[in-house]
């Protein structure tokens, strides 16, 4: 891998995104569009390239027009400014940072717009904050365009986003497939049993106890070689400071260059926030404890471990926090990402990290079941819809087949309706690039308020009146609205801890809502015979076959098969650089075998494996010994 490789990976989708944004604003200069790219996928870089192209193509006039780039965190503005400087320095644009670009905090934005009639476009970074009161003056200016950047087109508080639609969106699994971000290894620390219904400081402080903190310290101590640069997320400022004090009193202090904490504008080094962040980025090995500080606008590709030591109802917060660890490090091609979640018994939270990695577009307040389906052609897409409609007993009159577009991202919401014992149907709501914002606005608005609606016994008609036609624009039939609302109300009932008096069918009907993401994968079905023979004895051959026919692996990967102790193999895709490390280890093991002959050389083998950089799971290290001992044909390059 090289810097060129990484650039090519980003270019593979950023060019499409830039074209889509330029096309939309060329058609409607005052449009309100979203750019949706998960954390680590280069939202800022893509948006800056788009702005530069708007000036290059004179959709924005470099001699007259300005754009305002606004955000709620200083780090986001600094990141944008640095990106503009980089692209302008490379000569890819006719615009000037000084003449055409204004970067301001959101609190200053309304005044800037009011005093400068040359501003024709506003970029809102982290646009999921876009429904906050401070953004209202921007959206009220109907003669300017707005581009929103976000990792998710939904606000966790359910407020609707005032955007027409997405210009471009890409999902988290697609970024992993393209080798743009790393898929983390998710690990668990068993926590305790807690009741934290309000998620306020008093509730979250219950998680700050010695038994739980010592479990975190033991996890760090046991994996100090793997967890090189760590960010720990806790729920309260006191917890951050208490855990910091415990950490510096352990042998870990000698293992890391720095152990520190940051809460708001205060930190253990008594530096300004900017100085603190700059210093932290220079360390190769560190542990940093924080409270919701380093979730947005913090870009340090050397971070390889995130520990989630505080639960959250916010899918977005989880995604952003975990995103700190999954960035590709151009100086460490063997980087592995780790996400460690302290899993507590919290009766009011069923969701765990793995669900969030599917990158759902909707609120998880009502705990929808989340599934992932792939297709590789228009016919497979239609077949997938048919299978969904059959499996979920969707009445024929509700079957919807959209106009197929290979570049669109499709998903479907299914709402269960009880028909009688053992008899349920589902109402489907198909989502694509055109209606995703409206569907998300409607669904999230109801999801986040359903507890209140139920407590106040507000019926579905009143709720949809609150939304208004602009908030839905997708469900005109009153029966269909009621069907959706009933399913969401039943989902809410099953999420509430210890609620008495529920009808049996409501209690047993979970999940009342299912969210299915349909992902396009280009399929190459011509697999050579020797490759089919190679995977034939793998215990995971079905999974490997699916990845092969969908080309769902990194370019120039190597397929290896690792012999298991009793029989057969386990298959695994690794990069070319990772393969070279495996090859080195096996060569050393073969040399040791040849030098020692029949002598006992287990100590030499243990020493080789202990000192090696293993690009595979430690549990498979014995497989390398078997390969060296038996001269196993263990690899096959892929084109």
Image (cartoon, rainbow, N blue to C red):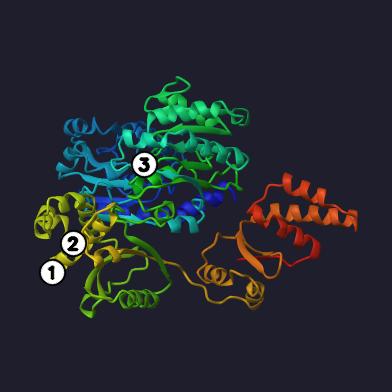
Task: Check if mark 1's residue and mark 2's residue have beta carbons within 8 Å.
Answer: no
Q: Secondary structure at mark 1?
A: helix
170 sits left or right of 636 in the view = left
| Quadrant in which the C terminus appears | bottom right
Q: Quadrant of residue 478?
A: bottom left
Mark sitting earlier along the chain (1/3): 3
Residue 353 to residue 82: above or below: below
Q: Is residue 601 left or right of residue 41?
A: right
> Is residue 321 or residue 62 the one in the foreground?
321
**Residue visible at 27% across and 63% down in the picture:** 507
Report the residue at 17% width, 49% height from top. Answer: 452
Q: Which residue is mark 2?
A: 485
Query: Is residue 577 at all visible to an observer of this figure?
Result: no
Residue ID for mark 3: 94
User: Dot 2: within a 10 Å radius of its alpha carbon, few (fewer than 14), some, or many (20 or more) residues?
Assistant: many
**C-alpha separation, residue under disc 3 versus residue under disc 2:** 51 Å
Q: Position of residue 280 (x, y in %)?
A: 51, 30
Give the alpha-carbon distance from disc 1 to disc 3, as whole Å: 54 Å
| In-image side of 584 versus 422 (left or right) | right
Mark earlier in primary sequence (1, 2) = 1
Q: Identify the residue at image location x=61%, y=56%.
A: 575
- Describe the element under mark 3 as helix, strand or loop: loop
Q: Return the residue nearer the eye: 498 or 398.
A: 498
Q: Is residue 286 visible?
A: yes
Say which residue label 1 marks: 479
Q: Nearer the viewer, residue 39 or 93?
A: 39
């Amino acid at each position: 891998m090289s810097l060129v490789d990484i650039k090519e990976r980003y270019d593979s989708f950023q060019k499409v995104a830039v074209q889509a944004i330029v096309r939309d604003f060329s058609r409607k200069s005052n449009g309100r569009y979203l750019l949706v790219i998960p954390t680590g996928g280069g939202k800022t870089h893509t948006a800056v390239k788009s702005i530069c192209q708007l000036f290059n193509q004179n959709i924005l006039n470099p001699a007259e027009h300005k754009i305002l780039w606004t955000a709620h965190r200083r780090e986001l503005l600094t990141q944008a400014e640095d990106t503009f400087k980089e692209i302008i320095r490379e000569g890819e644009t006719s615009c000037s940072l000084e003449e055409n670009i204004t970067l301001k905090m959101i609190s200053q934005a309304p005044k800037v717009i009011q005093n400068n009639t040359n501003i024709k476009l506003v970029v809102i970074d982290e646009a999921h904050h876009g429904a906050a009161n401070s953004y209202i003056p921007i959206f009220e200016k109907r003669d300017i365009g707005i581009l929103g950047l976000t990792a998710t087109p939904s606000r966790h508080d359910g407020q609707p986003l005032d955007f027409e639609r997405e210009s471009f969106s890409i999902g988290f699994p697609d970024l992993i497939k393209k080798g743009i971000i790393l898929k983390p290894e998710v690990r668990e620390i068993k926590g305790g049993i807690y009741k934290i219904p309000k998620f306020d400081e008093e509730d979250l402080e219950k998680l700050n106890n010695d038994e739980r903190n010592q479990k975190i310290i033991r996890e760090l101590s046991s994996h100090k070689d793997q967890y090189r640069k760590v960010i720990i997320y806790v729920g309260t400022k006191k917890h951050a400071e208490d855990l910091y004090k415990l950490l510096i009193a352990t042998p870990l202090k000698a293992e890391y260059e720095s152990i520190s904490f940051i809460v708001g504008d205060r930190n253990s080094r008594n530096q300004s926030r900017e100085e603190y962040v700059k210093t932290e980025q220079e360390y190769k090995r560190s542990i940093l404890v924080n409270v919701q500080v380093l979730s947005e606008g913090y870009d340090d590709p050397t971070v390889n471990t995130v520990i989630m030591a505080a639960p959250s109802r916010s899918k977005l917060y989880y995604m952003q926090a975990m995103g700190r660890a999954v960035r590709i490090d151009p100086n460490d091609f063997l980087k592995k990402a780790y996400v460690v979640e302290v899993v507590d018994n919290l009766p009011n939270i069923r969701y765990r990290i793995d669900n969030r990695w599917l990158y759902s577009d909707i609120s998880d307040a009502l705990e929808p079941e989340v599934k992932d389906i792939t297709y590789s052609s228009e016919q497979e897409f239609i077949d997938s819809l048919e299978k969904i409609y059959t499996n979920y007993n969707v009445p024929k009159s509700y079957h919807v087949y959209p106009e197929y577009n290979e570049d669109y991202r499709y998903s479907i919401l299914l709402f269960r309706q009880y028909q009688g014992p053992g008899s349920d149907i589902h109402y489907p709501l198909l989502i694509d690039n055109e209606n995703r914002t409206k569907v998300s606005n409607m669904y999230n608005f109801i999801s986040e308020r359903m507890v209140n609606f139920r407590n106040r016994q507000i019926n579905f008609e009143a709720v949809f009146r609150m939304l208004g036609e602009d908030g839905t624009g997708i469900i005109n039939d009153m029966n269909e609205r009621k069907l959706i609302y009933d399913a969401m109300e039943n989902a809410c009932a099953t999420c509430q801890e210890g609620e008495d008096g529920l009808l049996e069918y409501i209690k047993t009907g979970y999940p009342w809502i299912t969210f299915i993401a349909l992902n396009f994968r280009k399929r190459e079905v011509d697999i050579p015979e020797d490759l089919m023979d190679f995977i034939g004895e793998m215990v995971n051959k079905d999974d490997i076959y699916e990845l092969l026919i969908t080309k769902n692996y990194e370019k120039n990967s190597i397929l290896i098969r690792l012999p298991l102790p009793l029989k057969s193999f386990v298959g695994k895709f690794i990069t070319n650089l990772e393969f070279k490390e495996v090859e080195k280890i096996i060569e050393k093991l073969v040399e040791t075998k040849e030098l020692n002959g029949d002598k006992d050389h287990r100590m030499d083998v243990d020493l080789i494996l202990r000192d090696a950089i293993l690009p595979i799971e430690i549990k498979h290290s014995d497989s390398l010994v078997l390969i060296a001992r038996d001269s196993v044909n263990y690899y096959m390059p892929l084109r």
